[in-house]
Image (tube, rainbow, N blue to C red):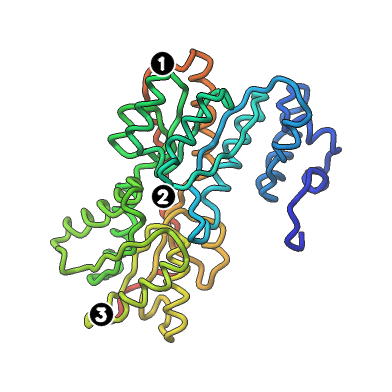
Amino acid sequence: MGGKKPTIDDVAALAGVARVTVSRVLNGNPNVRESVRQKVFKAVDMLQYTVNMQARFLAGGRMHVLALVVESDVDSEPNSFYQSGLELGAMRACTEVGIQLVVQTVSQKSVAGRAKILGLVDAGACEGLILTPPFSDDLELIDELNRRSFPVACVSAGKAASQYASSVRIDEERAGFELTRHLLKLGHRQFGYIRGPQEHQAAEERFEGFKRALDEVGLGASAYQAEPGNFTFRSGVELTQTLLARSVRPTAIVCANDDMAVGALFTAHRIGLAIPQEVSIVGFDDTPISEIIWPPLTTIHHPIKIIGYEAAKMLVERIKVGGSGEIRTHVIPFRLVERETSAAAPGG
């Protein structure tokens, strides 16, 4: 693609169908064979194609609209895949039923962030909200939405928020536990841990799972050093420098997402450490970069697109019953993906 944004014609060419067929699928037209529909969705996923929503609004006409609210911090680089993966999944669910999806970016650092989200609701700009972290853990925001009886579905909400709004998630704590147990079985006993932002409850649950795994084998706080990351490549680079400068160097570094793990790999490569012979590095999410980095990254497969799809589907169902209904949590399975950045501890 040469760095160019994919077009509807690119989707049509990859799927082997006409341009009008792609348009019908993306508009939720039921008069399309299921096999053709799946070809189009596969092409959309492969190209990470997103619809130009602004142009479609200018075309006029009544539309049913859901809004996907994502965090945007202009002071740091974006996550490599997480947000786009959620958007792809949610868009697929919406197009299946002829509902439009818009993405609203909001800075969590802005004092007006919550007001901006509520402004969408009060202006009638959408009929339902999909909240992603950290907004999916904002209890005051969720309370305001509930007061308005406004349909909302949360992505990866923590235990507290899950009591007040329906959500889709994986078992974050269990995933952190399983990832750490993998390293313990390889003989590792000294760890570095790069955390996510503390306001992201899902990231904190991953850390709790890490600590529980250590507790089960009798290891305490002296077995690890944790550093506060922010999910970016840069924080992985910088914090790995700190961890590897310890007098007792960790033999394994656990990162709360893949972007930070790739940063950790960069630092280890730069100072000449052999991976995984001298240090194992593992991540979280199984984003596309985890397969193409060298060595390929051991990580937890986090079904991001499926979670986006299920959150949108949950929200559509909630809208159909007028925003009411039982609060429920849909837990999606995860899996450990063993690649080439984890191996037996040195001297083990």
Badge 2, how many Cα within 10 Å: few under 14, some, many 20+? few
Residue at numbered disc 1: 325
Q: Is 223 positioned to the left or the right of 23 in the image?
A: left
Kindly identify the residue that appears in the image at 35 percent across and 48 percent down. Answer: 200
Kindly identify the residue that appears in the image at 52 percent across and 57 percent down. Answer: 78
Are the residues flagged by discs 2 and 1 in contact, CB closer than 8 Å?
no
**Closer to the camera in the image, 347 or 281:** 281
User: Residue 83: percent from the left, percent from the top?
Assistant: 53, 48
Residue at numbered disc 2: 109
Q: Is residue 49 above or below residue 293?
A: above
Q: Earlier in the sequence, mark 3 or mark 2?
A: 2
Mark 2 or mark 1, whichever is nearer to me: 2
Badge 1, how many Cα within 10 Å: few under 14, some, many 20+? few
Q: Earlier in the sequence, mark 2 or mark 1?
A: 2
Q: Report, in whole angstroms, how far the alpha carbon at label 3 lies from the one at label 2.
A: 32 Å
* Image quarter of the N terminus: bottom right
